[in-house]
Each structure stands twice: as C-alpha cells, then as structure tokens.
Image (cartoon, rainbow, N blue to C red):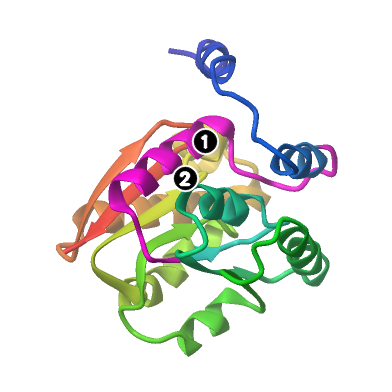
Amino acid sequence: MNRMEYGRIESFINSYIPEDEDNLEEIYRQARLDGVPVIRRTTKELIKTILMMKKPDSILEIGTAVGYSALFMSKIMGESTHITTIELDKERAHTAMANIERLGRSQNIYVINADASEALKELPDASYDLIFVDAAKGQYINYYEEVLRLAKKDAVIISDNILQDGEVLESHFTVEKRNRTIHDRIREYLYLIMHDDRVESSILSVGDGVSISIKK
C-alpha cells in the first residue's frame, strides 16, 4: 500500500469521526491553523478506546502543546482522573494553561513548563496508570527509563508519531541529513520496546504510527 492509498483510508475513517464538543473543537482547529502539532483524529479515537478500557486514575503526558490532548483525555475520563502534562515551550505551556482554565479543568490537569528530561526525574516512582509520550521524537529513547520508573505495574505507555510520516521506513542514507538522528533514534526506540522483557509492546500504523506498551 503506497502513501496515497493510506492517506485515502485515513481520510475515509476521519469522515466517520464526529467533531469534538464545546470549545475543544475550536482549540483543535486553531492549533492546526497555527501549525501546532496535535494528535490526529484516528489516534485520538484509539486513545479514547484505551482510556475507556483502562480507566486510569492518573495520567502523565509528555508534550502538552496547547493542551488539546490533555483536555480530550480529561473529557473522556472526568474530573476524578488526575493528569500531569509537561511542555518545554513557554508560550505553548501558557496557552495550554489558559485553555485548561477556560474549559474548567484546572483542578485535575497540571501543566509543568520544563524540559521533560529534568521534570521526569522529579516525579515519584510508579505514579501513573497511563503515560502518553508525544514530544520530540528523537528524545523518546532518552525518556524511556524514566517513563518505566514512573509507570505502575500494568500501566499503558502510548508513544505517538513513531513512523514520522513513513520516513522511519527509509534507509538511513536516503533520509535528509538533518533528520537522520531522529530517524535512527526512533528505530532504536522501536527495537528497544519490542525486545525489552519489562514491557509487552505492539506497533500500530494508526495515524502517524503509535506504539503501545504494557509494563509487566
């Protein structure tokens, strides 16, 4: 299946996915207009299904952007689920905080404006039922040990955009030189999660690629 055919399939699926309610759709559309990365609708539907099956009490998100995915997860789970989300970019973190306040979710969504590599070290062991990794793709491999430390037994770890619009399939030498480090690190990350005895993982071609790992 070529990329054009895959794109047609995703567009077909998207046509069946309803828009978000209230101001959440507005946040999504504005983020897209501003070029801010937000989860694809097909990925969002997968996460919704996992949330409803897992019913996590505590969620950690690495990569807040403007708060869309945290707000979406909070909407699905309700105010009893606590969400901690980390964003490096100061402007985006402030926008996320404003969006969270506007939608009345500031009591259960906490935004940390910091480098995730440092912020993760400050969080307590085995604190989260679900961890959603959606930040700089080249850093996934560097976050991994901290993510495992923070995950409870049987926690779900979701990593987004692991196919990089198909670029990760290409040979190292056919990828643009500026993208080769990310390309190699994503491949290293995928190999690790599929061979690490501490987790049970699957790689799915949903959206821009999603990996799902369960901590044993």
Q: Earlier in the sequence, mark 2 or mark 1?
A: 2
Identify the element where label 2 is drawn: loop
Instruction: Name the quarter where the N terminus is drawn.
Output: top left
Residue 201 percent across, percent down from the top left? 25, 50
Residue 177 percent across, percent down from the top left? 64, 49
Q: In the image, is residue 125 above or below residue 136?
A: below
Q: Is residue 54 left or right of residue 124?
A: left
Seen at 76% across and 45% down, the residue is 27
Identify the element where label 1 is drawn: loop
Q: Is residue 61 left or right of residue 88?
A: left
Do the CB atoms of the residues marked 2 and 1 lie less than 8 Å apart?
A: yes
Residue 208's label in the rendered image is: 1
What is the quadrant of residue 202 in the picture?
A: top left
Seen at 29% across and 58% down, the residue is 192
Front one among 98 and 175:
98
Residue bearing mark 2:
162
Residue 181 visible: no
Task: Tell me the kind of residue under disc 2.
Answer: Ile
Seen at 45% across and 71% down, the residue is 143
Magenta region: which residues? Answer: 33-59
Seen at 46% across and 57% down, the residue is 132
What is the quadrant of residue 209 in the picture?
A: top left
Task: Tell me the kind of residue under disc 1.
Answer: Asp
Q: In the image, is residue 81 above or below residue 204?
A: below
Magenta includes 36? yes
Residue 146 percent across, percent down from the top left? 39, 77
Callout 2 environment at 10 Å: few (<14), some (14 to 19), or many (20+)?
Answer: many
Magenta includes 109? no
